[in-house]
Structure formats: structure tokens, C-alpha cells
Amino acid sequence: MNGDRPGWLRCLLAGAVFAVCMAGTTLPTPLYPLYQAKLDFSELTVTVVYAVYAFAVIGVLLLAGNASDAVGRRLVLLGGLGFSAASAVCFLCATGLGWLYAGRLLSGLSAGLFTGAATAYVMELAPRGGASRATFVATAANMGGLGCGPLLAGLLAQYAPWPLYLPFVVHLALVAASAAVLLRLPETVRELRPLRTVRPQRPALPAQVRAVFGPAATASFVGFALFGVFTAVSPAFLAQSLDLHDHAVSGLVVALAFFSSTAGQLAVGRIGVGRSLPLGCALLLAGLLLLAGALHGNLLVLVVLSALVGGAGQGLAFRGALSSVAAASPADRRAAVISTLFVVAYAGISVPVIGVGLLTEPLGLEGAGLVFIACMAVLVTTAALYLLRRPVRTEA
């Protein structure tokens, strides 16, 4: 076991770098009400600013999602840290909406580069036979980092000076430390190739995957849509409907959804892939109903419960979706199929959130949220009923 310690240390350090990058993507979440007050823009603009991130992630996944297989993990991850630092600089300079759009775009580019490359890097640095633990490290770093972003920003905005500046200064310091760590870690790709050899990845869906992919993609779409609405709209709801202007509480509510997702993903190992996808759909539906109750009754406790239950459902459903789709895919098309699933999932972050923003002006935040919940409830219920009639493969 002692001989494995250097390998696990490298694995954990790579996980920490992963977490720092992902934290940067959610760092502005509890700060949007402050930007609204400073720059005077609508709730629709908040949702569009948020959705720019998802479009950037999708673009990178399609155009350069496999770049680290050619040029190496470290070079791609250093590029991702560079985009993350540039995003923080944009937010520090934010004197107009253009800076916010640029910051979210750069943040999406960083996440797009990290999503696949960092997951592979963490697993490759683990000692032989440690795949299961390495998967836990990668999962915890990804979702845990996403949760730590709003928590850190909310605490600093509430209890420290310069709320629109200090969170990004701290993040820049963490990015610099992460780059120093990354430069000391070994490269895991043995045969490096020039960047010009990288080709865009086309979405692929072989015939034998389609029966599984439909419900899996639907559950993933709804789960990410729920996260999208939580991160883009919940700070405004807490401030406008509940008269709660505590940025730390706002950040904590969003963070709970991501932490709960991590727990849900970890529970798949005990529950099993075959049951985790329909159970995840059921929890997603319960989370949506709790959110509807929160919007209608203006109750903070229901917002928190929605974050916990919906987050757990998202974690169960998404890891179950990944496992079932991977099991049904032919080996030579598996990476392309999984990339297609990620594209659908990130579309869930962007498209419904913009829809909520468009409906906010004529219907109000509560009405727009209830329309969103009704649409997502229909989708996830349909997926759950299909899965009960045709259970997914469990060999993953």
C-alpha cells in the first residue's frame, strides 16, 4: 500500500486542480443580483449570460473534446486554466454587459477543455487497480468544485469587502497554484501528436443505442435543466420573493444541489445502474414538485429540499445514463456516443434557462418557473415510465 501513495497523491492533486477550474465556472452565481443592481439589466439578461457558458462548453466538446488524446492532458488542462484565469479577469473588469458575456464564454471554454481531459487524467494517475476510487475522485472534484464556487463567492460577498472583486482575486490565486501543481505532475499520454491531427467529433448514435439513449438523454436534459435554473434564477428568487439578500445563504442553496448530486452519483454503485436511472427520474420529479411548492408558497425550506432531492436525482440519473449508454454502445463508437449525451445534457443547462428568462417579464419569476417545472415534469415522467417498461442494461 505504501508503494501506492505517490500515485494516489498525484491523483488527488489532479483532482484538486479539476475542482479549482470547475469552481470558477459557478463563482458568479450568487453575485448576479449585485451585477443587476450595478449594471441595471433584466432577469432575461441574467439567463442569457448564464447560458453563454453552456454554448461554449458544447462547442469545445464537439470541436476539441478529444484534443488531450493527441497533445497530452497537461497542455490541454493548462489551456483550460488559462481560460479560467481570463474569465476571472473579465469579471474583475466588468463595467458593462460585454465583460460578463466574455467572462462566461471563457469560463465555458475552460470547462469544455477540462470535462473530458481532467477526468481521464485523474483516472490515469491512480495506481493500478484503483479505477473505482479514481472515479470517485473525479466525480467529487467535478461536482464538488461546482458546488464550492457559489459557496466561496457567497461567503466572501457577504462577510468580506469588495464583493464583486475579492472572489475572483481568490480564484486567480487558486488558478496560479493549480498551474504550479500541474507543471509538476507527469504526462500520461505516451504518444503525443500535433494539434493539427485533432478532428472535430460528430455526434453519433448507432442503432443499438437508440432505445436506451432516448430516456437516458431525457433524464440528463431535465437534471441539467434543473441545475441551470437553480444557478441562474434562484439568487433572484431568494432576493425578490423571499426578501433574502444574504449572499452566503444564496451560495449555499446552489452548492447543496451540486453536493447532493455528488452523493447521488456515489450511490449508483450500491443501487445499481438498472435501478438508478428510474429512481433518479423519480427524485428529479420530486425535486421539481418541491421547487413548484417553493415558488408558489415562497418557502425557503422547500427551496433547500428541492436542491437536496433534485440534486440527488440528477446525480443518480446522470451517472445511470452514462453507464447505460456506455454499456449499449459498440466499443469503437462509445466515446462519440458519450459526447452526444454530454451535448444533450449541456443543452439542458442553456435552452430551458433562456426560456424561463423570456417568460419572466410577462408571467413573473414564479409563473415562468411553474411553466418550466410543468414542461420538465412531463419529460421526466415520460422517461421514467419508459424505463419501467423497458429496463436498461446493467452490465456497465
Image: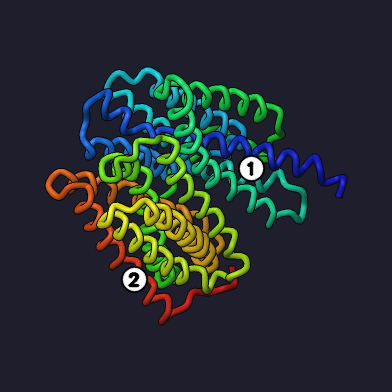
Cα–Cα span, label 2 and label 1: 36 Å
Type of the residue with mark 2: Thr
208, 22: nearer the viewer: 22
Q: Position of residue 10 (x, y in %)?
A: 72, 38
Q: Position of residue 44 (x, y in %)?
A: 22, 39
- Is 123 above or below relative to 101? below
Q: Residue at 33% across / 33% down in the picture?
A: 32
- Is 184 above or below relative to 360? above
Residue at the extreme bottom of the image, as rendered:
389
Q: Position of residue 230 (x, y in %)?
A: 36, 48
Q: Which mark is residue 258?
A: none
Give the residue at mark 2: 381
Secondary structure at numbered mark 2: helix
Residue at the extreme right of the image, as rendered:
2
Give the residue at mark 1: 121
Type of the residue with mark 1: Tyr
Q: Residue at 55% across / 69% down in the picture?
A: 273
Q: Residue at 65% across / 38% down in the picture?
A: 14
Residue 204 in sight? no
Badge 1 density bin: few <14, some 14–19, many ≥20, Cα 10 Å: many
Badge 2 density bin: few <14, some 14–19, many ≥20, Cα 10 Å: some
Q: Residue at 63% across / 53% down in the picture?
A: 135
